[in-house]
Amino acid sequence: MEMQDFDDLARQVADLILSSKRIVVFTGAGVSTESGIPDFRSSGGIWSRFDPDDFTYQKFVSDVDARRKHWQLLGEGSLTTDAKPNPAHFAIAELDRMGMLDCVITQNVDNLHQKAGLADEKVFELHGNLLWAECLSCGQRYPFDQMVVRLGQGEEIPDCESCHGILKPAAVFFGEALPTDVLMEATRRAQSSDLCIVIGSTLVVYPAAYMPQYAVSSGAKLVIINLSSTPMDGDADVLIRAKAGDAMAKVMELVRGAR
C-alpha cells in the first residue's frame, strides 16, 4: 500500500468516526499480537506446537493429562500477565475519552483494553479473560498471577485451595458456551451501532464473527483494519491492510486534529 493510499484511507475512517454517534469496535488476535501475545491460528502460532483437541472444555475437565498440558502452555506467561497495551489499544481508549466510543467487543482474553484505560463495563469479552482462574466446584476465583507463581514453584496442575476442585482459566475453551449475558449485550450493542470498526480479526471464529454482520445488517457502516483478507471485506466501507497500531494511531491523529 502506498503511503498516500494509507493516509487517504485513514482520513476516510476518521471522517466516519466524526460523523457517527454509536461506534462499536470489534477486536481480534491481530491487536494482541502487536503486544507480543502469540496468535493461536497463524503459521508458527500456538496450534503449531499443541494439538487443539487437547484444549476442549470436555477434555480439560475429564483428562488430567490435558489439564497438565493446558497449564504448561499458560505457565509460559506470554499469554497472560506480562503483555502491555500497544498503540491500537491506546487509540481505542482515546476514542473513549473523547466520548465517541459505545463499547469494545473483543475475541481477546488478555485484559489489554482495560490496561489501556477502558472501564470493564465498556469491554465485552466474548471469549472470557485470563486475568482470573475459577474453581469449577465452588466458584472461588483467583488472580491469574497467583497461578503463575504456583506453576513457577513446581505445581503442574493447580487446584482450588478452598475445596481442591478443578481450577480453570476464566477464558472460553473449545466446546464451551460463550457467556450468555455478554453475548446478548454485545449483540444488542452491535445491532444499535452506526459504525463498526473491526481491528485485527479475520472474522472466521463464530459466534463472535456474527457481531460485525449484525451491525451491517442493522445499517451500520463498516471499517476493517486487518493484514489479511476476511469474509466481510466486500461489505466494508473502508478496508485498510495495515497493522492495527499503525492504522489506529494515524486515524486518531486525524480525529484529534479535526476536533
Image (spheres, grey):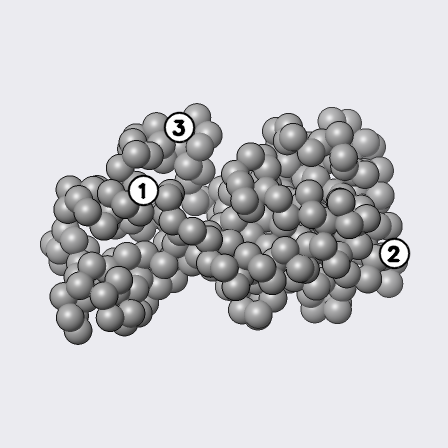
Which element is circle 3 on?
Answer: loop
Please give the residue where the numbered disc 1 appears in the rendered image: 56
Residue furthest out toward the left: 154
Please give the residue where the numbered disc 2 appears in the rendered image: 19
Looking at the picture, how far across and down is residue 256, in whole percent? 80, 59
- The answer to which of 58 and 13 lies nearer the viewer is 58
| Distance between mark 3 and mark 2 Cα atoms | 40 Å
Within 10 Å of disc 3 (Cα), the crowding (few <14, some 14-19, many 20+) is few
- The answer to which of 115 and 212 lies nearer the viewer is 212
Look at discs 1 and 3 and give the one toward the viewer: 1
Type of the residue with mark 2? Ser
Which element is circle 1 on?
Answer: loop
Please give the residue where the numbered disc 3 appears in the rendered image: 44
Type of the residue with mark 3? Gly
Type of the residue with mark 1? Thr
The image quadrant that residue 209 belongs to is: top right
Q: Of the residues under marks 3 and 2, which one precedes in the sequence?
A: 2
Please tell me which residue is depicted at 81% across the width and 48% down the height of the picture: 219
- The correct choice, above or below, for 113 with respect to 241 in the image is below
